[in-house]
Image (cartoon, helix red, strand yellow):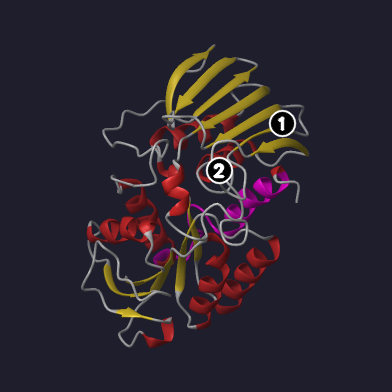
Amino acid sequence: MRYVILGTGNICNTYVRALSNIRGAELVGCVSRSGRRPSAAPDLFCASSLEEIRVPFDAVIVTTPNGLHHRGIIEAAGLGKHVLVEKPLDIAREAMDQAIKASESAGVTLAVSYQRRTNPDNIALKAVIDSGVLGRIYSADLSCRFWRNQAYYDSGDYRGAYALDGGGPFIQQASHNIDTYVWFFGMPETVVSQLGTFAHAIEVEDHGAAILRYGNGMIGTIIASTCAYPGYPARLEVICEKGTFTTTDDRITVWEVEGVANPSVVSEKPLDDGARSAVVTDTSRHEDIIRDFEASVREGRKPLVDAEDGRRATELILQIYGK
């Protein structure tokens, strides 16, 4: 497939490098509000809108700030192009619904880049949870204690502000982990939370905690922070009827479940946990998402993370934000 990237900030470079590792994928241009080209592809043709791209292309990768995602999706769908959008789908329910409607009306594929779902242990755990062999799940506690310095927030005028970021670590850094959480356990019935801003001069939260109650009685907790110097791997700790297990950066590190074999899959792929930096050095999971996206277009099936999946992850975050 031939791609155009919409938005040329930091995350754009991750997709440039990922596409270069996928046989048959070709990046033919980019669209930038500022006219800045990706540092990973300084000679790439750069336009101010998708309509200015004169060479044929099949799909758009949207990497603009969060609150602009729906605009890019709608613009691409209007041209009949498939869309892979960087997380989150968007920051508001109305914006997400507009994006989904536009893609459905145009008959194009819309996928969301929650690449942690491609981790082998997450795939294995999803199958085990869905099988019911763990018995009743009592609790699931997700801890995303990350670190970002003030320079990170000062690097863009939209960072740390509600208008385009949509919030702090819940919708930004921990959004990936929250998507996996919803993938595993579904949506809760009730959510209560406390948010605060402690270590940064920003408008949004930089630390918070939420308690989730599920219809089956499960109690979950989610902590998301960018105050936890120097940044720690995300952890998911689950207590169930048959025992307990823990994942650390999406790998099973504790498995004490009676009568159920540890489903952990040995993988040589490193994983960028994002705990200490926004810079992505390993693009293998993004490559997985792009390959799945292409296969979904080719086979006419749902992508691994479709628009409704992306909407659910943001819906839970919005409930944590009290919206």
Region of the chain picked out in magenta, as a range: 298-319
* Other-residue count near label 1 (Cα within 10 Å), few / some / many at <14 / 14–19 / ≥20: some
1 or 2: tag closer to the N-terminus: 2
Q: Is residue 318 magenta?
A: yes
> Which quadrant of the figure has residue 9?
bottom left
Q: Determine whether, in the image, residue 158 is placed left or right of residue 308.
A: left
- Residue drawn at x 41%, y 68% is 7
Pinpoint residue 317: horizontal percent, then vertical percent: 65, 46
Please say whether residue 262 is visible from this viewpoint: no
> Which quadrant of the figure has residue 222?
top right
Between circles 1 and 2, the one closer to the viewer is 2
Please say whether residue 309 is visible from this viewpoint: yes
Q: Which residue is mark 1?
A: 211
- Residue drawn at x 43%, y 48% is 152
Q: Determine whether, in the image, residue 60 is placed left or right of residue 215.
A: left
Give the amino acid at mark 1. Ile
| Quadrant that contains the N terminus | bottom left
> Does 200 sit above or below residue 255?
below
